[in-house]
């Protein structure tokens, strides 16, 4: 069983992010080969980041986030795209933690307008590479997200997105397991 932190950076207002998160958590929750820890960044009062302060600083919220990231074997980030980038709350959370990210796998579920959040994902790949995180190739993206869910909050193309989620989770479990075994055999240092 793999411990996966699902990090949501969805907007607290609006249905789009809630629909994406609810759908993905429902799909991932059906798997018997992973255990989920949902980290809703809108509920964590992280202080502003200061470059002079060491990562995983002294405040309680940052320590708690660092512990949850440290306990995870892998991550799935659910993010919207705003102005061709990911939201500030996600950048703050990523920068608040340092060593706890290293030598683990991450996957992405994104949403937005025409690009479906893929520009945000490409930026996140660069940031996570700096933190020694292995990102899986396949993603799930919702282009024109407002058209991708019906009135009940269900995907209008369940076969397509459910298949994409399976591929993402299969890759994440492979990489997450391989990296967990490698860290156990030979600790990774940043």
Image (cartoon, rainbow, N blue to C red):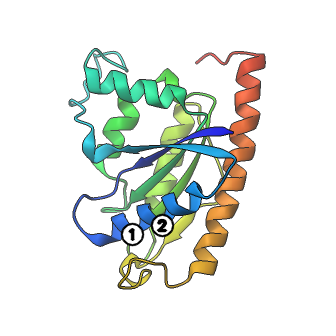
Name the residue: 45% across, 30% down.
68
The image quarter in which residue 103 lies: top right
Horizontal and vertical percent for residue 86?
Answer: 37, 54
Q: CA distance from mark 1 to mark 2?
A: 6 Å
Residue 131 appears left or right of 86: right
The image quarter in which residue 4 lies: top right
Please tell me how crowded label 1 is: few (under 14), some (14-19), or many (20+) other residues with Cα within 10 Å.
many
- Secondary element under disc 2, as helix, strand or loop, is helix
Name the residue: 25% across, 32% down.
46
State if disc 2 and disc 1 touch (CB < 8 Å): yes
Between 20 and 121, the one lying in front of the other is: 20
* Residue 163 in view, yes or no: yes
According to the picture, the residue beneath numbered tag 1 turns out to be 19
Horizontal and vertical percent for residue 181?
Answer: 76, 27
The quadrant of the image that shows the N terminus is top right
According to the picture, the residue beneath numbered tag 2 turns out to be 23
Name the residue: 52% across, 39% down.
128
Looking at the image, residue 10 lies above or below residue 14? above
Horizontal and vertical percent for residue 47?
Answer: 21, 29
Between 78 and 71, the one lying in front of the other is: 71
The image quarter in which residue 75 lies: top right
The quadrant of the image that shows the C terminus is top right
* Residue 111 in view, yes or no: no
Please tell me how crowded label 2 is: few (under 14), some (14-19), or many (20+) other residues with Cα within 10 Å.
many
Horizontal and vertical percent for residue 78?
Answer: 44, 55
Between 14 and 135, the one lying in front of the other is: 14
Looking at the image, residue 159 lies above or below residue 30? below
Give the number of callouts. 2
Label of residue 160 in the image: none
């Amino acid at each position: 069983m793999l411990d996966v932190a699902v990090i949501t950076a969805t907007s607290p207002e609006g249905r789009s992010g809630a629909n994406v998160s609810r759908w993905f958590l429902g799909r991932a929750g059906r798997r018997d080969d992973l255990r989920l820890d949902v980290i809703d960044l809108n509920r964590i009062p992280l202080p502003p980041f200061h470059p002079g302060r060491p990562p995983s600083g002294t405040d309680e919220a940052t320590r708690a986030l660092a512990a949850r990231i440290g306990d995870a074997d892998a991550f799935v980030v659910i993010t919207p795209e705003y102005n061709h980038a990911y939201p500030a709350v996600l950048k703050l959370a990523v920068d608040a933690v340092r060593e706890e990210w290293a030598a683990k796998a991450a996957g992405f579920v994104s949403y937005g307008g025409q690009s479906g959040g893929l520009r945000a994902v490409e930026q996140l790949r660069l940031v996570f590479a700096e933190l020694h995180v292995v990102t899986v190739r396949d993603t799930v993206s919702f282009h024109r997200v407002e058209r991708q869910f019906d009135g009940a909050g269900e995907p209008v193309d369940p076969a397509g997105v459910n298949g994409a989620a399976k591929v993402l989770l299969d890759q994440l479990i492979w990489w997450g397991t391989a990296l967990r075994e490698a860290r156990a055999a030979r600790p990774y240092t940043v």
